[in-house]
Image (tube, grey):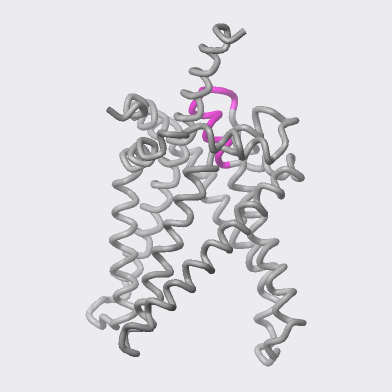
Amino acid sequence: MNPFKKLLPAVRLCALRNLPKLALAELLTALISAFAFFIFIAPFNINQSIQLSFQTVAPFFISLLLSLVISYLLQYGCFVLTDLLYTGRYAVIGHLFTGFRDFKRGVRTALFFMLTYIFALFSASALGWAASTFFPGSFRLNMLLAVTIICVFVTLAVLYVRWGFVWFFLYDDPSLPVRQALHKSALVTKKKRIAFVLFCLQSGGLYLLCAALVLIFLLAQSLFDFSVISSPLDAFLRMLYMLCLYMALIRLRIAFAAVYEAEREKDAALLPENT
């Protein structure tokens, strides 16, 4: 039996009660991240005649990292805000900017996630490119794109299942080093990761499935040029994809908060026996 299944009612209740505030946090995160990306990346698109060289690639890569750091700092705040709402503590939209107040540790955590993700993604893309060489030329690009997309989601899932609790530990203990917070995060679901993944799927799996199906349809439309799809329907499908994706993210963050609080209560109950 899944030890986390009993937390499902609490996850649903939290999502129902706090949906407006959580949705606003997701919207602000998306808008600020997009604005940061535009500010840092736009200068490289102004002059299309710039030749590809180290002088242009290096600043572009640094600018991309800076925009991603801002996104992860906002993600820090999203997790904290979700945990505060789940536990019924005082929570305002200002908690969304917790990562900026804890800037040093927030940046270190962001760099850890980004570098780990980039390394894993490049490795997976190389394997996908090698596998695509066994297919005819007309299908090679499509196969590479499909493998890359799958690798993106798998890599993100592995990263967050293991280290997705790190922001809770950082917020609850302002003196805790990032390395120790990552280690504690990895221990939360140790030997229970399959059960935790199933719990996450139960919490937000329906929205994830809907988003995945719509994304597959949109990708197929772009690859095979479905001319029968009208512009209003295409816009509706894109809006449906974003809605399902953000609802899934909200549910998944609540699931992380529920497991973190449950494991913390369990550790607190065992503490007197060990002292």
Q: Is residue 265 above or below residue 94?
A: above
Q: Nearer the viewer, residue 46 or 11?
A: 11
Q: Nearer the viewer, residue 81 or 92?
A: 81
Q: Is residue 17 visible?
A: yes
| Count of numbered marks | 0
Image position, residue 248 (x, y; %): 39, 47
Image position, residue 177 (x, y; %): 72, 36
Quarter holding the C terminus?
Answer: top right
147 falls in the magenta region = no
Image position, residue 159 (x, y; %): 51, 49
Q: Nearer the viewer, residue 135 or 38?
A: 135
Q: Is residue 236 visible?
A: no
Q: Which residues are magenta?
A: 78-90
The residue under the point 51% across, 18% down is 265
Left or right of residue 163: residue 191: left
The residue under the point 58% across, 63% down is 118
Identify the main secondary structure in magenta.
Answer: helix
Left or right of residue 35: residue 18: left
88 falls in the magenta region = yes
Q: Is residue 19 above or below residue 124?
A: above
Image position, residue 250 (x, y; %): 44, 42
The residue under the point 66% across, 61% down is 67
Quarter holding the N terminus?
Answer: top left
The residue under the point 66% across, 74% down is 42
Outermost left residue: 228
